[in-house]
Amino acid sequence: MKTPSIPSLSLTLLLIFTCTSAASANAHEDFLTCLSHESMNNTYFANDVHSTASSSFDSVLQFSIRNLRFASESTPKPQVIITPEHESQIPPVIYCAKQYGVEIRVRSGGHDLEGLSYVSQNQFVIIDLINMSEINVNVEEKTAWVQSGATLGTLYYRIAEKSSTLAYPAGLCPTVGVGGQFSGGGEGTLLRKYGLAADNVIDARIIDVNGKIMDRKLMGEDLFWAIRGGGGASFGVIVSWKVQLVDVPEKVTVFTVNRALEQNATQLIQRWQEVAPKLDRDLFIGIFFFGLTAAQTGANPTILASFFSLFLGEVDRLLPILEERFPELGVRKEDCSEMSWIESTVYFATAPIIPPPEPLPLEFLLNRTQPGLRLLKMKSDYAVKPISAEALEGLYTQFYEPEAAESFELMLPYGGRMAEISESAIPFPHRSAYMFKVALTVAWEESLAHDSVKYISWSRRYHSYMTPYVSKNPRATYYNNRDLDIGVNNVDGNTSYAQASAWGIKYFGDNFDRLVRVKSVVDPHNFFKNEQSIPPCSKKED
């Protein structure tokens, strides 16, 4: 990775840090003075520091916000945003933040659904890794080094530049930053064949609370275990990842089949629950479902279930599998499209429910902007047994309510490779005991921001309704579908194991205890913290 030149720091650097609020002036100014001093000794920051006085501040802050719930004037703002171009610029930020009691939030793509990568109730700065997005693919080794500020779309594109038969098993949305995706798990259409993104990380570079830059060998296996699915923000600043690429055929097959209630959608969803986790691991079939109003249908309101699929092979091999295992779905050859794996990533990123008339170019994957932003709230669950037809019908009534107008449910099948990996291999524990994941996304327009409480309340009613039909003791949920409703740490950072376990066990199961032990060693004073960060053990709890 390239190292920037390090010219001497001009005395004018400090002048860009002059405007602060009265309430936070001292810590703010002390931090910036410290940073200017440390920068003079170590590295160069002039173009990478954006204070509230900078003309660039608002645009840099807003650019990577993907949930408009956290884009309002009342949302707490950072005092400074640092956009480093090299890992050597980060240790001075950590040092100065520690010296003057300023929190650090680290942002890669901005898709954190509760805004924890760029919002805090305390004085804070953002380390925004957007400029650290270099990707180096090694086809011979089938590996890649990926900086945390890169997006999934760019990673997929760079892999395809080098090989048409290599891929990486991560998420569907191309604007997601790899830093958050990899450190929380990373689900996608390849999970039944190859597991999660985090399952395929083989090295990383992290900067710890003391500013030390470490790879896997230096950090040790406990910390390396923790950052692959346990949330990197609890342990340091992860600047890059080495990943194992996976094999895919020259041609894959995709299809999308939409079925409304009048076309036996309920029966198909029931059959899918039994079949999808047990299919050939080359075959992934997921479901989106959502409500359609009478105005949309021209008749009665209904539910539309959209079955979307990736098959690692050609259509002539796919159809006999479907005819044998899932004939009820009625997939025909004309419903299917053969394409390269990289083309399939564009297909799934561009609304596979209603594919565009013409395929978008592969360069679409390089775009970091996210069109059609909404205010969002998300809930996720895991099913250990099929959800009955009666339960599904009760669920549909929720989607006929006005708050669900832009909401949808996503059902992802597990099984295959996911059922073979040990629950303790990485912190992500949701493996052989689970048939599929159910995730709700509630969305509403920015013009309805004043009604946010109403939409969030609807999501909680939905969550309450689902209680009897999903996992219990704990009611498991996915860390990358962050949900503060399940529990939070204290704002001051002093949070007991018992309090944090309310949410921690739901995300991590029995792995939560090991995460706490790792945190207690690498960050015993809890410098890296947020509302759902792993706490260290206090002496009373040891």
Image (tube, rainbow, N blue to C red):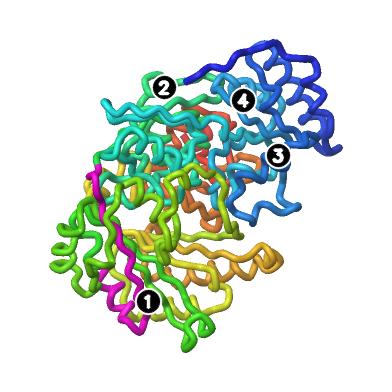
Q: Nearer the viewer, residue 63 or 222?
A: 63
Q: Is 258 inside the magenta-drawn segment?
A: yes
Q: How far is disc 4 from disc 3 in space, using C-alphas?
A: 15 Å
Q: Nearer the viewer, residue 94 or 356?
A: 356
> Which residue corresponds to mark 4?
94
The residue tagged 1 is 392
SS for callout 4: helix
- Rendering coords of residue 244 (x, y %): 31, 33
The disc labelled 3 sits on which kind of residue? Pro
Alpha carbon of mark 3 to alpha carbon of mark 1: how far? 43 Å
Relative placement, left or right, of 272 versus 51 is left
Sequence-wise, the earlier of marks 2 and 3 is 3
Give how far apart the Cα atoms at labels 2 and 3 are.
Answer: 29 Å
Determine which residue is flagged by label 3.
Answer: 78
Q: Please tell me whether residue 445 is drawn above or below residue 529 in the rendered image.
A: below
Q: Which mark is residue 215?
A: 2
**Quadrant in the picture for residue 358:** bottom left
Q: Amino acid at mark 2?
A: Asp
Q: Residue 292 placed where, x, y %?
A: 48, 78
Q: Nearer the viewer, residue 325 or 475?
A: 325
Where 318 sits versus 103, above or below?
below
The x, y position of residue 205, in whole percent, is 45, 25
